[in-house]
Image: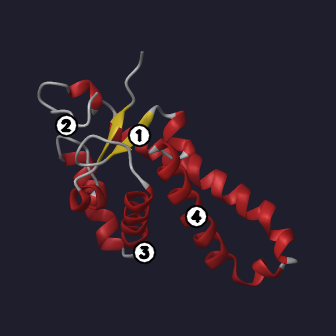
């Protein structure tokens, strides 16, 4: 796929097939990975992170999402589910877009109505885009197989 834009869901529906389910499964995998990383890093904080673990967990998760999205346009959970996030041109996310996407995700998760709207959008729109995807023009797609 060349970087001319996102695939058209009408002519190339296979790029968006099962995306909401795959995103949900990827999210579960990512929560497990972030939890494990947070627990493994806790001794390095001399166990002080126990006293502010939700904030510590958020910071670890934020860094994990930005780093994995910037490196391969997909978190480890997304890679396992064979999906990736593409920007409005169809290209992979760079560091700036990974940061913006993660920021949008964090805001959506923190504000329940936005999280609900994002979920409904993923289920109801042709490209299965969440709220952050709509704002950025990005979309999760199935990785092309060779």
The image quarter containing residue 128 is top left
SS state under label 3: helix
Q: Which residue is mark 4?
A: 63
Q: CA distance from mark 1 to mark 3?
A: 23 Å
x then y, percent, for residue 23: 42, 44
Q: Quadrant of the C terminus?
A: top left
Above or below for 96 versus 2: below
* Contact? badges 4 and 2 (CB < 8 Å): no
Q: Earlier in the sequence, mark 4 or mark 3?
A: 4
Q: Nearer the viewer, mark 4 or mark 2?
A: 2
x 28%, y 27%: residue: 1
Q: Earlier in the sequence, mark 4 or mark 1?
A: 4
Q: Are marks 4 and 1 in contact (CB under 8 Å)?
A: no
Report the disc number at residue 4.
Answer: 2
Mark 3 vs mark 2, foreground winner is 2
Q: CA distance from mark 3 to mark 2?
A: 33 Å
Q: Using the image, tell me which numbered label, if any, was put on residue 110.
A: 3
Give the CA separation, mark 4 to mark 1.
18 Å
- Mark 4 to mark 3 CA distance (whole Å): 16 Å
Mark sitting earlier along the chain (1/2)? 2
Q: Which residue is mark 1?
A: 84
Q: Nearer the viewer, residue 106 or 72?
A: 72
Q: Earlier in the sequence, mark 4 or mark 2?
A: 2
User: Could you say whether the residue bearing mark 4 is in a helix, strand or loop?
Assistant: helix
Q: Classify 10 Å Cα crowding around label 4: few (below 14), some (14-19), many (20 and above).
A: some
């Amino acid at each position: 796929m060349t970087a001319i834009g996102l695939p058209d869901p009408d002519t190339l529906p296979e790029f968006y097939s099962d995306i909401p389910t795959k995103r949900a499964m990827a999210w579960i995998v990512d929560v497990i990975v972030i939890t494990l990383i947070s627990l493994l890093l806790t001794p390095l904080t001399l166990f002080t992170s126990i006293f502010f673990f939700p904030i510590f967990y958020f910071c670890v998760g934020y860094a994990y999402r930005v780093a994995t999205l910037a490196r391969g346009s997909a978190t480890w959970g997304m890679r396992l589910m064979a999906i990736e996030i593409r920007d409005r041109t169809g290209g992979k996310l760079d560091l700036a877009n990974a940061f913006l996407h993660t920021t949008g995700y964090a805001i959506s998760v923190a504000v329940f109505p936005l999280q609900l709207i994002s979920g409904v959008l993923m289920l109801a729109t042709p490209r299965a885009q969440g709220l952050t995807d709509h704002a950025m023009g990005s979309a999760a797609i199935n990785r092309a197989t060779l």
